[in-house]
Amino acid sequence: MGEQVEKDDKNKKMTNPVIIFLIASMCCILWGSAFPAIKIGYKIFSISPNDTFSQIVFAGYRFLLAGILTILFGSVMSKKILIPSKENIGMIMKVSIFQTILQYFCFYVGIAHTAGVKGSIISALNVSISIILASLVFHLEKLSKRKIIGSIMGFLGVVIINLNGNSIESGISFLGEGMLFLSGVAYGFSSNLIKIYNKDENPILISGYQFVIGGAVLIVVGYIFGGGIHFSTMSSIYLYSYLGLLSAIAYTGWAVLLKYNPVSKVSVYGFLTPTCGFILSGIVLGELKQAFNVFSLMALILVSLGIIIINKK
């Protein structure tokens, strides 16, 4: 009886609009900061845009660390060591393929070939793609006219940012914009899988172990094909510590919210990710001219409004 009351209290807390706002906002701000952080990381480790497999190794170490930290945090919170059961392994593997391996293989390659400002806006499509897949593929939600209109607005924003060659890097490439779009598709599949599996499983356990597996796979693949990085300075260690903590905190928080709430109710806050990535990239990377002009701001507004319309009740 006591356990049921405690469970009901937790459910009530995690569905509280204020709690959802605070946790989701924190996650999106952290994710937004990843855009300039990754760009800075490429400079620290002297990774060129064409050195694809060093980029993959870079991503792999980040998520291996994130996974270890997530498992440690979860074990402390649960007051026991989190160890997956045989039933969990299949779930963890599926989530890892989409959440870490495919999504971040595409993302790290894409962001290396795209301006930070531009990349943050294109990646905002993740929310629209996730909800469309929830409706058409996973049948978790209905695809309403409102969601269709919101998705169209989001795509229009991306079209504007890519056609305006005078403000942001001109042209569209598969390795840049194309890979970021594929990253969004992988994100869409992973977020819906997480929603399904988290109903009956510990979201922190699944997040932690899928990070470890995905990070290890990316590292091995990267090194096999000639990639590599060297931790030669304190700045490289500080950067990795931040990126690892960022992922551990943000994905754990997001996974917990998805366990107790509909995808749409959580995703409404997704517009904060491109907004923060947009602003931070402009300031930190010196892309102020690219960030603050009529076309890029119009694109950001369209994408953000599209996300809000999709999730508006």
Image: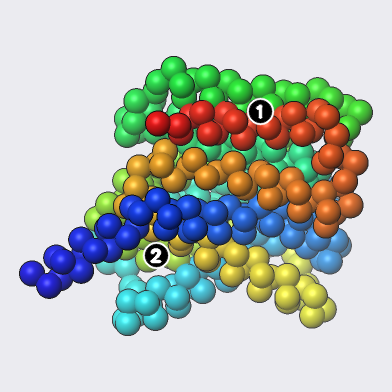
Tag 2 and tag 1, C-beta contact below 8 Å: no
Q: Is residue 189 left or right of residue 223?
A: left
Q: Where's residue 254, x and y in %? A: 46, 55
Quadrant that contains the C terminus: top left
**Residue denoted by label 1:** 302
Question: Residue at image x 53%, y 37%?
Answer: 127
**139, 310: nearer the viewer:** 310
Label 1: how many residues lie within 10 Å, few (<14), some (14-19) or many (20+)?
A: many
Secondary structure type for disc 1: helix
In the rendering, which numbered label is found on residue 268?
none
**Residue denoted by label 2:** 204
Classify 273 as above or below 233.
above
Q: Where's residue 25, x and y in %? A: 54, 54
Secondary structure type for disc 2: helix
Observer able to see residue 200: yes
Way the structure is coloured: rainbow
- Farthest-out residue, top: 145
For marks 2 and 1, give the CA distance: 33 Å
Question: Residue at image x 58%, y 52%?
Answer: 28
Question: Residue at image x 14%, y 65%?
Answer: 4
Task: Report the amino acid beneath label 2.
Answer: Ile
Label 2: how many residues lie within 10 Å, few (<14), some (14-19) or many (20+)?
A: many
Q: Is residue 284 left or right of residue 64?
A: right
Quadrant that contains the N terminus: bottom left
- Res. 42 image quadrant: bottom right
Task: Report the amino acid beneath label 1.
Answer: Leu
User: Which is more foreground, mark 2 or mark 1?
Assistant: 1
Q: Identify the mark nearer the N-term, 2 or 1.
A: 2
**139, 84: nearer the viewer:** 139
Q: Where's residue 159, x and y in %? A: 72, 23
Q: Is residue 115 left or right of residue 220?
A: right
